[in-house]
Amino acid sequence: MKAITLLRVDSSRAASRSANRHVAIGDLDELAAGLARVFQVSCHVEAEPVDAEFSYDVARDQYNSTAILQRLAGRGSEAERHLLGISGLDLFVPILTFVFGEAQFAGHCAVVSVHRLREEFFGLTPRAGIQRERLLKVAVHELGHTLGLRHCADWHCVMATTHNVEGLDLKGMEFCVRCLSRSGLAAAMRGRV
Ligand SMILES: [Zn+2]
Ligand SMILES: [Zn+2]
């Protein structure tokens, strides 16, 4: 991975369905800075959002993350540039109630959602700091899958599997030594210094 492009994944009709489905530009810039720090690559935020209305499932009132991934993959990208969609929409895959994100394994596209990372989702007072931290962890995790990493048994590792925000808050932001070396990131980072 040499660079990351962040794409806002929005829906032209979501605003009329319910509030809190958009990602603030400030959150995107913050995430870009965090990802640039973790992966030691340049991270650019694309101005034009992707309209994910095509992935809307009326029965579930959610958006199909696999369909969004396919759309992102169809955009094409230069080699070694990974595309990460950031959404405020509630994402799902058919076999699960919801997903925080989904990635192409050893591919170059991933999508994550802030929808269920927000304290407001649980009826709590918004806390921007914790939400940003959760989003960064989910984004690093999904990009880890694009680098060919599977789930990790070390619960401190960002590649540990998490199904709720409690688990997300417990795990770390970093890759464990094994995941670092498996992903090729360690060697790539060494090569850059
Ligand atoms: Zn995962
Ligand atoms: Zn690990």
Image (spheres, rainbow, N blue to C red):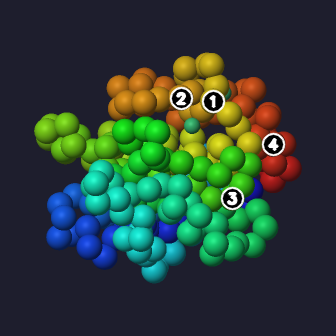
Q: Amino acid at mark 3?
A: His
Frontmost of labels 1 and 4 is 1
Choose the circle earlier in sequence order: 1 or 4.
1
**Residue that mark 1 sits on:** 151
What secondary structure is marked by label 4?
A: loop
Choose the circle earlier in sequence order: 1 or 2.
1
**Residue that mark 3 sits on:** 108
Choose the circle earlier in sequence order: 3 or 4.
3
Label 1 with label 4: CB-CB less than 8 Å: no
Q: Quadrant of residue 98?
A: top left
**3D distance between C-alphas at marks 1 and 4:** 16 Å
Label 1 with label 2: CB-CB less than 8 Å: yes
- Residue 166 spot, x, y in % from top left: 35, 26
| Residue 56 as seen in the image, left or right of residue 172 | left
| Residue 95 as seen in the image, left or right of residue 166 | right
Location of the N terminus by quadrant is bottom right
Q: Is residue 190 above or below residue 87?
A: above
What secondary structure is marked by label 1?
A: loop
What secondary structure is marked by label 3?
A: loop
Q: Quadrant of residue 82?
A: bottom right
Choose the circle earlier in sequence order: 3 or 2.
3
Q: Is residue 50 above or below residue 118?
A: below
Choose the circle earlier in sequence order: 2 or 4.
2
Query: Going 65% across and 43% down the picture, which residue do you hit?
Result: 144
Mark 2 residue's CB less than 8 Å from ligand 1: yes
